[in-house]
Amino acid sequence: MQVKLLGPFVAQEHHGSIVPSAAKPRQILALLALRAGGIVTTATLMEEVWGDRPPRSAPTTLQTYILKLRRLLEQALTAPDDPLLIGAAARPVAADQLHAKEVLVTRHGGYQLDIEPGTVDTQEFERLQEIGQAAFTAGDFAAASTLLGQALALWRGPALVDVRTGLELEIEVLRLEEARMTALESRIAADLRLGRHGRVLSELAALSAQHPLHEGLHAQYMAAQYASGRVWQALQTYQRLRHTLDVELGIEPSAPVRRLYESMVAADVLLDAPSGLLPSVPLRAGRALPSAV
Protein backbone atom coordinates (compact mmCIF):
# COMPACT_ATOMS: atom_id res chain seq x y z
CA MET A 1 0.00 0.00 0.00
CA GLN A 2 1.11 3.55 -0.75
CA VAL A 3 -0.30 6.37 1.37
CA LYS A 4 0.21 10.09 0.77
CA LEU A 5 -0.98 12.60 3.34
CA LEU A 6 1.27 15.58 2.59
CA GLY A 7 -1.21 17.18 0.23
CA PRO A 8 -4.40 15.64 -1.18
CA PHE A 9 -5.13 12.29 0.50
CA VAL A 10 -4.04 9.30 -1.58
CA ALA A 11 -4.16 5.66 -0.47
CA GLN A 12 -3.70 2.93 -3.03
CA GLU A 13 -3.41 -0.82 -2.92
CA HIS A 14 -2.32 -2.32 -6.24
CA HIS A 15 -4.15 -0.09 -8.73
CA GLY A 16 -7.21 0.66 -6.63
CA SER A 17 -7.86 3.66 -4.42
CA ILE A 18 -9.14 2.92 -0.93
CA VAL A 19 -9.88 6.53 -0.02
CA PRO A 20 -13.63 6.80 0.63
CA SER A 21 -15.58 9.77 -0.67
CA ALA A 22 -17.67 10.09 2.51
CA ALA A 23 -16.15 12.56 4.98
CA LYS A 24 -16.20 10.52 8.20
CA PRO A 25 -14.72 7.27 6.87
CA ARG A 26 -12.12 9.45 5.13
CA GLN A 27 -11.21 11.01 8.50
CA ILE A 28 -10.89 7.60 10.11
CA LEU A 29 -8.62 6.23 7.40
CA ALA A 30 -6.47 9.37 7.47
CA LEU A 31 -5.95 9.10 11.23
CA LEU A 32 -5.17 5.39 11.02
CA ALA A 33 -2.68 6.10 8.21
CA LEU A 34 -0.96 8.89 10.15
CA ARG A 35 -0.44 6.47 13.00
CA ALA A 36 0.22 3.42 10.83
CA GLY A 37 1.73 0.56 12.77
CA GLY A 38 0.23 1.78 16.05
CA ILE A 39 -3.12 1.18 17.67
CA VAL A 40 -5.67 3.99 17.47
CA THR A 41 -8.22 3.55 20.20
CA THR A 42 -11.94 3.50 19.56
CA ALA A 43 -12.30 6.50 21.87
CA THR A 44 -9.75 8.48 19.84
CA LEU A 45 -11.50 7.66 16.57
CA MET A 46 -14.88 8.65 17.96
CA GLU A 47 -13.48 11.92 19.33
CA GLU A 48 -11.99 12.71 15.92
CA VAL A 49 -15.28 12.14 14.12
CA TRP A 50 -17.83 13.41 16.67
CA GLY A 51 -15.86 15.57 19.08
CA ASP A 52 -16.66 15.45 22.79
CA ARG A 53 -20.36 14.67 22.21
CA PRO A 54 -20.57 11.41 20.29
CA PRO A 55 -24.09 10.05 19.71
CA ARG A 56 -25.20 6.87 21.43
CA SER A 57 -24.91 5.09 18.12
CA ALA A 58 -21.24 6.12 17.70
CA PRO A 59 -19.66 2.70 18.52
CA THR A 60 -21.96 0.91 16.08
CA THR A 61 -21.53 3.58 13.41
CA LEU A 62 -17.76 3.42 13.79
CA GLN A 63 -17.86 -0.33 13.20
CA THR A 64 -19.89 0.32 10.05
CA TYR A 65 -17.27 2.77 8.80
CA ILE A 66 -14.49 0.25 9.48
CA LEU A 67 -16.47 -2.37 7.55
CA LYS A 68 -16.79 0.00 4.58
CA LEU A 69 -13.06 0.69 4.64
CA ARG A 70 -12.32 -3.03 4.66
CA ARG A 71 -14.60 -3.55 1.68
CA LEU A 72 -12.71 -0.90 -0.28
CA LEU A 73 -9.45 -2.49 0.77
CA GLU A 74 -10.61 -5.98 -0.19
CA GLN A 75 -11.67 -4.74 -3.63
CA ALA A 76 -8.25 -3.19 -4.14
CA LEU A 77 -6.42 -6.30 -2.91
CA THR A 78 -8.25 -8.51 -5.40
CA ALA A 79 -8.18 -6.06 -8.33
CA PRO A 80 -6.44 -7.25 -11.53
CA ASP A 81 -2.72 -6.48 -11.69
CA ASP A 82 -3.17 -4.93 -15.13
CA PRO A 83 -4.92 -1.55 -14.66
CA LEU A 84 -6.49 -1.95 -18.13
CA LEU A 85 -8.43 -4.91 -16.78
CA ILE A 86 -10.02 -3.04 -13.86
CA GLY A 87 -13.69 -3.86 -13.94
CA ALA A 88 -13.00 -7.42 -15.04
CA ALA A 89 -13.39 -10.40 -12.76
CA ALA A 90 -11.34 -10.26 -9.59
CA ARG A 91 -8.13 -12.23 -9.68
CA PRO A 92 -8.01 -15.53 -7.78
CA VAL A 93 -7.01 -15.23 -4.17
CA ALA A 94 -3.53 -16.63 -3.62
CA ALA A 95 -2.80 -18.63 -0.52
CA ASP A 96 -0.39 -15.99 0.78
CA GLN A 97 -2.46 -12.97 -0.25
CA LEU A 98 -3.39 -10.54 2.47
CA HIS A 99 -7.01 -9.99 3.36
CA ALA A 100 -8.50 -6.68 4.45
CA LYS A 101 -8.75 -7.77 8.09
CA GLU A 102 -5.00 -8.42 8.09
CA VAL A 103 -4.30 -4.87 6.92
CA LEU A 104 -6.96 -2.97 8.85
CA VAL A 105 -6.67 -4.98 12.03
CA THR A 106 -8.96 -5.03 15.04
CA ARG A 107 -6.92 -4.70 18.22
CA HIS A 108 -7.94 -4.65 21.86
CA GLY A 109 -9.58 -1.30 22.35
CA GLY A 110 -9.08 -0.03 18.81
CA TYR A 111 -7.77 -0.54 15.28
CA GLN A 112 -4.42 -0.62 13.53
CA LEU A 113 -3.40 -0.05 9.93
CA ASP A 114 -0.72 -2.70 9.58
CA ILE A 115 1.35 -1.75 6.53
CA GLU A 116 5.04 -1.86 5.69
CA PRO A 117 7.28 0.90 7.09
CA GLY A 118 8.10 3.62 4.59
CA THR A 119 4.87 3.34 2.62
CA VAL A 120 3.37 6.47 4.24
CA ASP A 121 4.86 9.75 3.06
CA THR A 122 4.67 11.33 6.53
CA GLN A 123 6.92 8.61 7.91
CA GLU A 124 9.40 9.06 5.05
CA PHE A 125 9.37 12.83 5.57
CA GLU A 126 10.13 12.42 9.27
CA ARG A 127 12.91 9.91 8.54
CA LEU A 128 14.60 12.19 6.01
CA GLN A 129 14.16 15.20 8.26
CA GLU A 130 15.75 13.42 11.20
CA ILE A 131 18.88 12.34 9.34
CA GLY A 132 19.02 15.71 7.56
CA GLN A 133 18.96 17.56 10.87
CA ALA A 134 21.63 15.21 12.22
CA ALA A 135 23.83 16.01 9.21
CA PHE A 136 23.30 19.73 9.80
CA THR A 137 24.27 19.39 13.47
CA ALA A 138 27.39 17.47 12.43
CA GLY A 139 28.36 20.29 10.05
CA ASP A 140 27.78 18.30 6.86
CA PHE A 141 25.76 21.05 5.19
CA ALA A 142 25.83 19.51 1.71
CA ALA A 143 24.21 16.31 2.97
CA ALA A 144 21.79 18.30 5.12
CA SER A 145 20.67 20.38 2.15
CA THR A 146 20.15 17.29 0.00
CA LEU A 147 18.31 15.24 2.63
CA LEU A 148 16.09 18.07 3.83
CA GLY A 149 15.36 18.99 0.22
CA GLN A 150 14.23 15.41 -0.42
CA ALA A 151 12.02 15.57 2.68
CA LEU A 152 10.39 18.82 1.56
CA ALA A 153 9.87 17.48 -1.98
CA LEU A 154 7.38 14.96 -0.56
CA TRP A 155 4.94 17.79 0.14
CA ARG A 156 2.33 18.33 -2.60
CA GLY A 157 0.39 21.02 -0.73
CA PRO A 158 -0.95 21.53 2.81
CA ALA A 159 -1.18 18.28 4.77
CA LEU A 160 -4.57 16.53 4.40
CA VAL A 161 -5.87 19.46 2.39
CA ASP A 162 -8.96 17.53 1.24
CA VAL A 163 -9.83 15.83 4.54
CA ARG A 164 -12.15 17.28 7.15
CA THR A 165 -10.20 17.46 10.39
CA GLY A 166 -11.41 16.95 13.92
CA LEU A 167 -9.38 17.47 17.09
CA GLU A 168 -6.91 14.63 16.55
CA LEU A 169 -6.19 15.32 12.88
CA GLU A 170 -5.95 19.05 13.50
CA ILE A 171 -3.18 18.43 16.04
CA GLU A 172 -1.39 16.14 13.60
CA VAL A 173 -1.65 18.70 10.78
CA LEU A 174 -0.23 21.45 12.99
CA ARG A 175 2.63 19.17 14.05
CA LEU A 176 3.45 18.30 10.45
CA GLU A 177 3.30 21.89 9.26
CA GLU A 178 5.65 22.95 12.08
CA ALA A 179 8.03 20.13 11.15
CA ARG A 180 7.88 21.27 7.54
CA MET A 181 8.80 24.82 8.49
CA THR A 182 11.69 23.58 10.66
CA ALA A 183 13.01 21.46 7.79
CA LEU A 184 12.69 24.40 5.41
CA GLU A 185 14.60 26.78 7.68
CA SER A 186 17.35 24.21 8.23
CA ARG A 187 17.67 23.48 4.51
CA ILE A 188 17.96 27.18 3.72
CA ALA A 189 20.49 27.63 6.53
CA ALA A 190 22.56 24.77 5.08
CA ASP A 191 22.43 26.40 1.63
CA LEU A 192 23.54 29.73 3.07
CA ARG A 193 26.49 28.10 4.81
CA LEU A 194 27.41 26.54 1.47
CA GLY A 195 27.48 29.99 -0.11
CA ARG A 196 24.32 29.51 -2.17
CA HIS A 197 23.00 32.97 -1.37
CA GLY A 198 21.88 33.78 -4.88
CA ARG A 199 20.05 30.47 -5.19
CA VAL A 200 17.82 31.09 -2.17
CA LEU A 201 17.14 34.81 -2.63
CA SER A 202 13.94 34.47 -4.65
CA GLU A 203 12.69 31.65 -2.42
CA LEU A 204 13.23 33.74 0.71
CA ALA A 205 11.60 36.76 -0.90
CA ALA A 206 8.41 34.74 -1.36
CA LEU A 207 8.60 33.08 2.05
CA SER A 208 9.13 36.32 3.96
CA ALA A 209 6.11 37.81 2.19
CA GLN A 210 3.96 34.77 2.96
CA HIS A 211 5.11 34.68 6.61
CA PRO A 212 5.37 38.36 7.59
CA LEU A 213 5.78 37.59 11.33
CA HIS A 214 8.39 34.84 10.96
CA GLU A 215 11.66 36.24 12.28
CA GLY A 216 13.76 33.23 11.31
CA LEU A 217 12.91 33.52 7.63
CA HIS A 218 13.45 37.27 7.67
CA ALA A 219 16.87 36.83 9.29
CA GLN A 220 17.79 34.34 6.58
CA TYR A 221 16.53 36.71 3.89
CA MET A 222 18.64 39.50 5.37
CA ALA A 223 21.66 37.18 5.41
CA ALA A 224 21.18 36.20 1.76
CA GLN A 225 20.73 39.83 0.70
CA TYR A 226 23.79 41.01 2.63
CA ALA A 227 26.01 38.22 1.30
CA SER A 228 24.84 39.04 -2.23
CA GLY A 229 25.96 42.66 -1.85
CA ARG A 230 22.44 44.02 -1.33
CA VAL A 231 23.11 45.66 2.00
CA TRP A 232 20.46 48.36 1.74
CA GLN A 233 17.84 45.72 0.87
CA ALA A 234 18.84 43.67 3.92
CA LEU A 235 18.38 46.73 6.16
CA GLN A 236 15.06 47.45 4.47
CA THR A 237 13.90 43.87 5.17
CA TYR A 238 14.63 44.41 8.85
CA GLN A 239 12.70 47.67 8.94
CA ARG A 240 9.73 46.03 7.26
CA LEU A 241 9.78 43.18 9.81
CA ARG A 242 10.07 45.66 12.67
CA HIS A 243 7.11 47.68 11.40
CA THR A 244 4.94 44.57 10.94
CA LEU A 245 5.72 43.21 14.41
CA ASP A 246 4.94 46.60 15.95
CA VAL A 247 1.64 47.01 14.11
CA GLU A 248 0.44 43.42 14.48
CA LEU A 249 1.79 42.46 17.91
CA GLY A 250 3.16 45.61 19.52
CA ILE A 251 6.63 44.12 19.97
CA GLU A 252 10.17 44.63 18.72
CA PRO A 253 12.19 42.03 16.78
CA SER A 254 13.97 39.54 19.01
CA ALA A 255 17.50 40.22 20.25
CA PRO A 256 19.29 37.95 17.71
CA VAL A 257 17.61 39.72 14.78
CA ARG A 258 18.39 43.15 16.24
CA ARG A 259 22.04 42.13 16.69
CA LEU A 260 22.18 40.95 13.09
CA TYR A 261 20.78 44.28 11.91
CA GLU A 262 23.20 46.28 14.06
CA SER A 263 26.14 44.23 12.78
CA MET A 264 25.08 44.95 9.22
CA VAL A 265 24.81 48.67 9.91
CA ALA A 266 28.29 48.61 11.42
CA ALA A 267 29.68 46.39 8.61
CA ASP A 268 31.00 44.01 11.26
CA VAL A 269 33.82 41.85 9.83
CA LEU A 270 32.39 38.87 11.71
CA LEU A 271 29.61 38.80 9.15
CA ASP A 272 32.12 37.54 6.62
CA ALA A 273 32.18 34.18 8.42
CA PRO A 274 29.59 31.66 7.16
CA SER A 275 27.95 31.42 10.58
CA GLY A 276 28.12 35.14 11.28
CA LEU A 277 25.09 35.87 9.13
CA LEU A 278 22.92 33.18 10.64
CA PRO A 279 21.76 33.79 14.22
CA SER A 280 19.45 31.30 15.81
CA VAL A 281 16.07 33.03 16.00
CA PRO A 282 13.59 31.19 18.24
CA LEU A 283 9.94 31.97 17.71
CA ARG A 284 8.27 33.78 20.54
CA ALA A 285 5.47 31.99 22.32
CA GLY A 286 2.02 32.94 21.13
CA ARG A 287 2.99 33.99 17.62
CA ALA A 288 0.55 32.39 15.22
CA LEU A 289 2.15 31.70 11.87
CA PRO A 290 0.37 31.18 8.55
CA SER A 291 0.42 27.69 7.08
CA ALA A 292 3.56 26.65 5.26
CA VAL A 293 3.39 26.94 1.51
Image (spheres, rainbow, N blue to C red):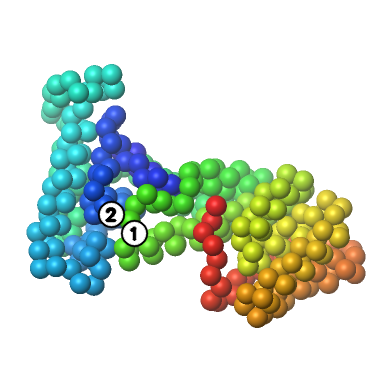
**Residue occupying the point 20% across, 72% down:** 53
Is 5 placed above or below 242 here? above
The spot of residue 225 in percent (x, y) is: 79, 55
**Residue occupying the point 82% across, 64% down:** 235
Is 285 placed above or below 64 here? below
Mark 1 touches mark 2? (CB < 8 Å): yes
**Residue 220 shows up from this direction:** yes
**Residue 120 shows up from this direction:** no
Relative placement, left or right, of 140 versus 44 is right
CA neighbours of label 1 inside 10 A, class few (<14), some (14 to 19), many (20+)? many
Q: Amino acid at mark 1?
A: Thr
Q: Amino acid at mark 2?
A: Gln
Q: Which residue is mark 2?
A: 27
CA neighbours of label 2 inside 10 A, class few (<14), some (14 to 19), many (20+)? many
SS of the residue at dot 1? loop
Specify the quadrant of the image occupied by residue 8: top left
Q: Which mark is residue 242?
A: none
Q: Which mark is residue 165?
A: 1
